[in-house]
Image (cartoon, rainbow, N blue to C red):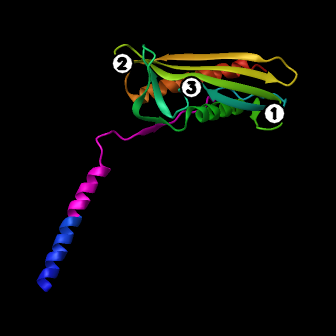
Amino acid sequence: MMNKSRKLTGICLLVLAVSLSACSGLTQSDKPATKTWWLEPYTDMTPAESSDPAVLLNVSVTVVPGLDTDQVLTLSDKAELNAYSAARWAEHLPELLSSLSERSLASSGRFAVVSARAQCELQLELQAFFADLSPSGETTGVRVAIKGRYQCKGGEAELLHLDALIPVRDERMSVIVSAFQQAVDRVMKDLLGSLGD
């Protein structure tokens, strides 16, 4: 009886060992781990030292079809929209641009971003946020383009066209993300300059 019990225990342990080794294959992958990339708001503008209170501003952001994603996108010379594998932004592009623009505007000291009681409205539409690829598939540059409309109560609407193209000559993701940061800085600086005093 004891012999049968030992055999049964041995068989159970063998089945368990085989099951565990089979499952370990499910947790391992040849794919590279996904990396999440961070972008900073533009904060290099000297905060306003005016005695005037900050303008209460409501910001809304939309994106054109294809850009509602957290993937780091590429655009080929044949207009094929794709993405770098295993690379993500910290958030989807509408939320990312909202955060970057709101924090950039607030850091200037001229604007307080609010959802109610706003004196002015800023509507932004992200039209490009991708890396351009050459016919051979190499990254040639990073493009960020935004159209916008700025209007304060009782005033005329001001149309905004913000565009930045940063050349890239390196396929490392850190270099490409650095180019995106430069492009974001440029369009945010232009945005702050366009809104005037």
Residue with the most extreme right position:
154
Q: Which mark is residue 65?
A: 3
Q: Is residue 28 left or right of residue 168?
A: left
Pointer 3 and pointer 2: residues touching (CB < 8 Å)? no
Question: Disc 2 on helix, strand or loop?
Answer: loop
Q: Looking at the image, which is closer to me, 23 or 121?
A: 23
Distance of label 3 from label 2 (alpha carbons): 23 Å
Question: For residue 1, which quarter of the picture?
Answer: bottom left
Quadrant containing the C terminus in the rendered view: top right
Q: Residues within 10 Å of mark 1 (few under 14, many from 20)?
A: some
Q: x%, y% of residue 148? A: 69, 21
Mark before the other along the chain sequence, 2 or 1: 1
To which residue does mark 2 refer? 137
Question: Disc 1 on helix, strand or loop?
Answer: loop
Mark before the other along the chain sequence, 3 or 2: 3
Q: x%, y% of residue 191? A: 67, 21
Residue drawn at (59%, 34%) of the image: 96
Q: Is residue 133 left or right of residue 118?
A: left
What is the magenta range? 17-43
Distance of label 1 from label 3 (alpha carbons): 28 Å
Q: Image height check: is 113 above or below 186? A: below
Q: Looking at the image, which is closer to me, 184 or 197?
A: 184
Q: x%, y% of residue 87? A: 43, 34
Of marks 1 and 3, the one in the foreground: 3
Residue type at mark 2 is Gly
Of marks 3 and 2, the one in the foreground: 3
Residue type at mark 1 is Ala
Q: Which mark is residue 118?
A: 1
